[in-house]
Amino acid sequence: MRRLNIRQMKSMKISSIKKGSFLKRSGRGSIVEEKKYSNLEISRYRRIEKELDALLK
Amino acid sequence: MPYLNSKVFYEFLKVYSKFFNYDIYCSLIEGRNFTIIDFLRKILTAIFSNVKKENILKALKTIEKDIPKSEINIVFTFHSHILFSRGHKLDELEFYFIEFFNAYEKLIENTHEKTKINNILVEFNNALSHIFFALENTNTFTSNINKAKSHLYRAILDCYKEILIENSNLIKQNQYQYIKIRKKEALNIGKNEDNKKEIIKEYKILLGIKSQSS
């Protein structure tokens, strides 16, 4: 896998960075790389979000 | 209102327990599931609002069903005498939670940048994990509650700082006030809690946000 330097990473959108190319850390050391959701998960989460919004309004 | 000493918060912790086991196993393998962390934030915000208890319990059930089973299964036993009685340090966290929920809502009004929002959710998740272990092990209760407060404090300030970055004109217009707060913040690193509350208040004044929790 091609390794990216800091300047390249900064100029890229997070969504375009392939998993495993680096683990993004917040300033305090926590690993904050987000899970890549499948299409199925995305539609399920949208449904859950709607459900929660209706229940918790 | 006893938000954190409630049965519904106990139910919340049980669901968080499932998430904690899933997160500790999966976050390094497939990345962190910020969607579920944000759902948990929504539910906890509702616990601090006037939302019907039945609806909160239904929402918790929905989330619980959706959290995948984990290869790690740490079983937690909560010390209910601490959870259900006031006067413990747990009550002191309520101020920080209310401030956090308000700051987060303001942040969302100002940015949709995922990485910024995720950084804040990391702090929220860290705070929850400390509360969780505070109630699990009484020997570490005070230190874990203090750590939870620190994470929420960081999250609150980060929300306001991100809003300031998005609205840099506010800094130009109120430069004297801005310098005063930044200096105060720097000089108060590691100092007591009253200063933290004061700094939160001053950031809100700078941003023109009304205080609700004090």
Image (spheres, coloured by chain):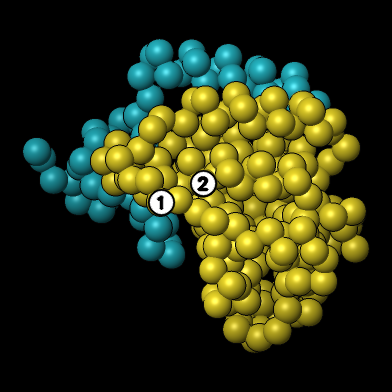
Chain colours: A cyan, B yellow
Amino acid type, mark 2: Ser
Q: Residue at x 62, y 27 (%)?
A: B61
Q: Does any portion of residue B193 appear in the rendered image?
A: yes
Residue in front for this viewpoint, B20 or B156: B20
**Which residue: 9% across, 38% down?**
A1
Q: Nearer the viewer, residue B172 or B80?
A: B80
- Kindly check if marks 1 and 2 are in contact, taking CB atoms under 8 A apart as contact: no
Q: Is residue B116 left or right of residue B45?
A: left
Quote the CA–CA distance across marks 1 and 2: 8 Å
Residue B191 coordinates in the image, percent (x, y): 66, 86
* Disc ID at residue B206: none
Q: Position of residue B103 (x, y in %)?
A: 72, 51
* Res B74 label: 1
Which residue in the structure is indicated by mark 2? Answer: B17
The three-letter code of the residue at mark 1 reads Ile
Image quadrant in which you'd find residue B83? bottom right
Could you say whether the residue bearing mark 2 is in a helix, strand or loop? helix
Q: Could you say which quadrant of the image residue B143 lies in?
A: bottom right
